[in-house]
């Protein structure tokens, strides 16, 4: 009877070890899958970085577009100033014409 109980204990321990081995194998498999996913993500990240560098070289940096926008704003501002100056100039030309006409009339009256 003690031999049978010893055999039962050994069998139970073997089953526990078998279960533990299965659990360990399952975890090893999960770890391997995680490693593969990490390697895949790293490869994708590297590919995206290479593509970003390639596009940056082709299109230039955003600084160029920012500079272009600032230049367009400055051009627009200067065009507005020029337009305002032309309006003032034309107004003065009209005033001068009226004054010349008035001076001409006064000279004729004398």
Image (cartoon, rainbow, N blue to C red):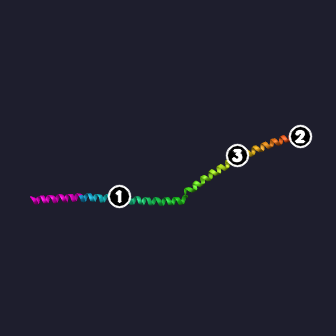
Q: Which mark, by number, is residue 34?
A: 1
Examine the structure image and report whether residue 8 is included in the region drawn in magenta: yes
Q: Is residue 75 above or below residue 50?
A: above
Q: Indicate which disc, 1 or 3, sits on the residue closer to the N terminus.
A: 1
Q: Are marks 3 and 2 in contact (CB under 8 Å)?
A: no
Q: Indicate which disc, 3 or 2, sits on the residue closer to the N terminus.
A: 3
Q: Residue at x 65, y 51 (%)?
A: 75
Q: Residue at x 40, y 58 (%)?
A: 41
Q: Indicate which disc, 1 or 2, sits on the residue closer to the N terminus.
A: 1
Q: Residues within 10 Å of mark 2 (few under 14, many from 20)?
A: few
Asked which secondary structure carries label 1, the reply is: helix
Q: Which image quarter is the C terminus in?
A: top right
Q: Which image quarter is the N terminus in?
A: bottom left
Asked which secondary structure carries label 2, the reply is: helix
Q: Which residue is mark 2?
A: 108
Q: Which residue is mark 3?
A: 84
Q: Which residues are magenta?
A: 1-19
Horizontally, residue 12 falls left or right of residue 106, namely left
């Amino acid at each position: 009877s003690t031999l049978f109980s010893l055999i039962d204990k050994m069998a139970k321990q073997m089953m526990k070890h078998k279960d533990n081995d299965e659990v360990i194998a399952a975890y090893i498999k999960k770890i391997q899958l995680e490693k593969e996913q990490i390697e895949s993500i790293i490869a994708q990240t590297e590919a995206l970085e290479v593509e970003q560098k390639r596009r940056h070289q082709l299109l230039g940096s955003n600084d160029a577009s920012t500079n272009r926008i600032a230049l367009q704003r400055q051009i627009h501002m200067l065009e507005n100033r020029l337009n305002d100056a032309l309006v003032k100039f034309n107004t003065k030309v009209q005033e001068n014409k009226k004054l010349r006409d008035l001076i001409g009339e006064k000279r004729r009256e004398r």
